[in-house]
Image: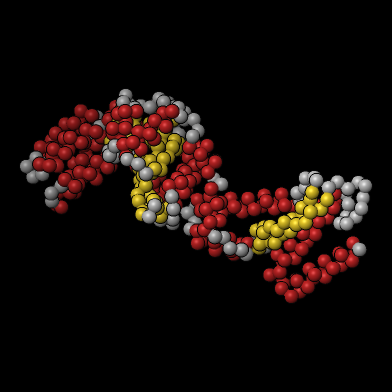
Amino acid sequence: MTHQRNNNLLSEITEIIFTEGMNGLDKAAAILINEAMCIERSKHLRAEPYERSLGRQGQANGFKDKALKTRIGEIELKIPQVRACDFYPTFLEKGLRSERALTSAIAEMYVNGVSTRKVQNIIGEMCNFNVSSSDVSRATKLLDDELDVWRKRPIRSCRYLFLDARYEKVRHGTSVVDCAVLVAIGVGDDGKRDVLGVSVKLSEQEIHWRGFLQDLQARGLHGLELITSDAHAGLKAALRAVFPAVKWQRCQFHLQQNAQSYVPKKALKESVAFDIRSIFNAPSQPEAERLLNITAQKYEKEAPSLSRWMLDNLPEGFTVFNFPVDHWIKIRTNNMAERLNEEIKRRTRVVRIFPNVASSERLISAVLVEVSEKWQTGGVYLNFS
């Protein structure tokens, strides 16, 4: 009987390959796998189907349908069920591992900036089955536990802290809103950079910044000597509340950009930019203050608003003079955080509008984990020795 059954299976598989060629591999594989699982069940029960045996442990209890995605396509399986004992086909455990590996691959493609449509096309060509948007979404959610651990990990001592914010489009109810993305970068005692944290929320800026900074502090952030950032609305108030004793450096690059809005004539823009650069490139703070007074007087009549703005705002970019000269070029601006934001933008622009805040935070966190690991395994950013 077993010999006859084997002949029937072989004939069925041969007919499929003969009539459908390579396109029939998934059906042929399904026949073989289903038969292998039945054989394994019989061995587990210590009895063939309908066999009366004193050594039998448990009884066969039909089959359960399952679709398994593989490299040769989607295979329709019939999983043997049993009563009165535990049984699960060994092959299916391996199949589930393969399925999880494929799911991880989908998530990784998504994180690396491949759009949902491209993911669908790639998986379709590789594995001969379709991947829906919901499949991609489920795959990316597998990252949540790992990313949550990373966002809550303890923080070591840091000398310098760089803060920046950007915005992503997120659906909120029936409308699309701008969702704030806050990022913190630290430079530790070893001189290496690390992405310390990220927060994506729909909230007022000061409340969001304050909660974000308090979370960094609660995770162990200490030893700060300088915080560099732009003058984001709410950030300065949050810094005063959470890190009142830490010196603050306003990004010199953004100060130069902000100054241009106070220049009344286009012909003056180049001259103003040159004068501000000269102030920031001064060899010491007293010299920078002297050049600032001279420059403010220079534009007092022709651009009085610019003159007043310079006196009120440019000194916020002088804090850097209190630190080692060879550190100035890297701590006087927030350019490092700006470049990190560009990397985030490169990955998120394929999504354009996130379905919710959680999906935005998931993708951005995954991108930052990659960057942080690269920095930690790379060279020293600043030398403190």
The answer to which quarter of the image holds residue 337 is: top left
Q: Position of residue 162 (x, y in %)?
A: 37, 36
State the residue in front, 359 or 216: 359
Q: Position of residue 277 (x, y in %)?
A: 23, 41
297 to the left or right of 69: left
State the residue in front, 318 or 32: 32
Q: How many marks?
A: 0
In the image, farthest residue toward the left: 301
Residue 34 in the image: above or below residue 108: below
* Quarter of the picture holding the C terminus: top left
State the residue in front, 326 or 40: 40
Residue at 88% x, 52% y: name it. 47
The answer to which quarter of the image holds residue 216 is: top left
Report whether residue 96 is seen.
Answer: yes
112 to the left or right of 341: right
Residue 89 in the image: above or below residue 147: below
Residue at 41% x, 43% y: name it. 200
Residue at 88% x, 48% y: name it. 56
* Quarter of the picture holding the N terminus: bottom right
Name the colour scheme: secondary structure
Report whether residue 339 is seen.
Answer: no
Q: Position of residue 78 (x, y in %)?
A: 74, 59
Residue at 31% x, 26% y: name it. 244
Q: Position of residue 18 (x, y in %)?
A: 76, 74
The answer to which quarter of the image holds residue 16 is: bottom right
